[in-house]
Image (tube, rainbow, N blue to C red):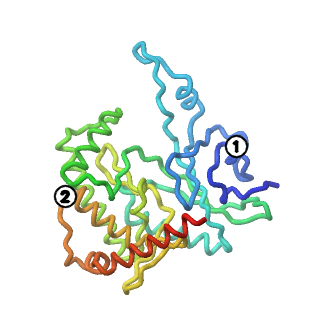
Amino acid sequence: MISEDIRNKSTICHPDVIALNFVVSSSPYVFRRHYRQGLRSHVMEVLYPGDVTIENTGTVIDGVRKFPRAIPYSMFRIFRTQFETLEDAWAEIERVKIVSEYLAPDFIAHSTEFIVEYHAPHGPELMLCGFQEYIDGEILDPWTILNAGNLLPTMYSTMRDRGASMSLSRDEWILDARKKGSQVIDRFKRMITHAGYIPDLAGVGNLIITSNGEVCLVDINNISPVYGDATIPLDEKGYPVCDKSIEAISLIEEKVVGRSINMEENLYRRFLTSQRKRMVKEKIELFSKNFESK
């Protein structure tokens, strides 16, 4: 019997994963902790052993020994939430499916969730896991200090310099990225209006921009309802993720698409007033205080 619930561990590694009762101990893959971790799940890279060996020992290319980083075959997520019933776990999957319906196939890392019986320290429990498509690209940080004139040129240069295959010139790529950025914003707004949900867009690392100029959501662990009244919804950690995600949409519209936001638009008029933003700031300060005290 295991001594500590894997969902409560701050970090996990390969031995922790293959020790799970539903994972074959002779798995042909290497599980490595991804450098971007969330509060709500463990995120593990699924790697081919041969790629890890080359990363560690190097390979000679044109007479020079290089150590290319192993690229994940897939991403493995273990949700930290401890579900009381099958219905609770299924409701979480349903929210993920809603997001996928609005963003797939171009603007989300495709994910397949599954529910397993986990042999926890105190007996069998339900656990939600998922295998997710690996998206290669640069983090799109809505809160960056870079403005619309600098953000995309900088991201293009960064991807090109690290060896990404850029099929378009810089100016062509920027125009394409702006077009696709406008498309994904329309998808987000449609999801809010029609489905009443919004994924977490506020966390740094939750959005990736690819060498094809596509903005992809890669973190699907925190999907918030959007209410029509003055309520400021908080997630289970006490964070106003809905409001901050809508603010993130406005920043992406400004910095990626390159257009000023229209404060007469219903979404922004409701969520981005000075009074509401002050209230959200107070919620964040309380969240930070509670988080630091733990």
Q: Residues within 10 Å of mark 1 (few under 14, many from 20)?
A: few
Type of amino acid under label 1: Pro
In the rendered image, which residue does mark 1 sit on?
Answer: 15
* In this picture, residue 7 sits left or right of residue 281: right
Badge number at residue 71: none
- Cα separation between marks 1 and 2: 46 Å
* In this picture, residue 19 sits left or right of residue 104: right
- Return the disc, 1 or 2, that comes first in the chain's sequence: 1
Query: Residue pushed farthest bottom?
Result: 229
- Helix or strand or loop: what does disc 2 sit on? loop
Can you say whether 70 is above or below 277 in the image?
Answer: above
Badge number at residue 258: 2
Q: Position of residue 31 (x, y in %)?
A: 61, 42
The residue shown at (79%, 55%) is: 3
Instruction: Please tell me which residue lies in front, 93 or 215.
Output: 215
- Helix or strand or loop: what does disc 1 sit on? helix
Q: Position of residue 51 (x, y in %)?
A: 54, 31
* In this picture, residue 127 sits left or right of residue 291: right
The residue shown at (68%, 60%) is: 116
Quarter of the image for the C terminus: give it.
bottom right
Instruction: Please tell me which residue lies in front, 287 or 182.
Output: 287
Corner quadrant of residue 30: top right
Type of amino acid under label 2: Gly
Can you say whether 104 is above or below 36 in the image?
Answer: below
Quarter of the image for the N terminus: give it.
bottom right
Q: Position of residue 252 (x, y in %)?
A: 28, 60
The residue shown at (57%, 56%) is: 130
* In this picture, residue 23 sits left or right of residue 215: right
Q: Residues within 10 Å of mark 2 (few under 14, many from 20)?
A: some
Can you say whether 166 is above or below 239 in the image?
Answer: above
Q: Position of residue 77 (x, y in %)?
A: 57, 54
The residue shown at (65%, 42%) is: 14
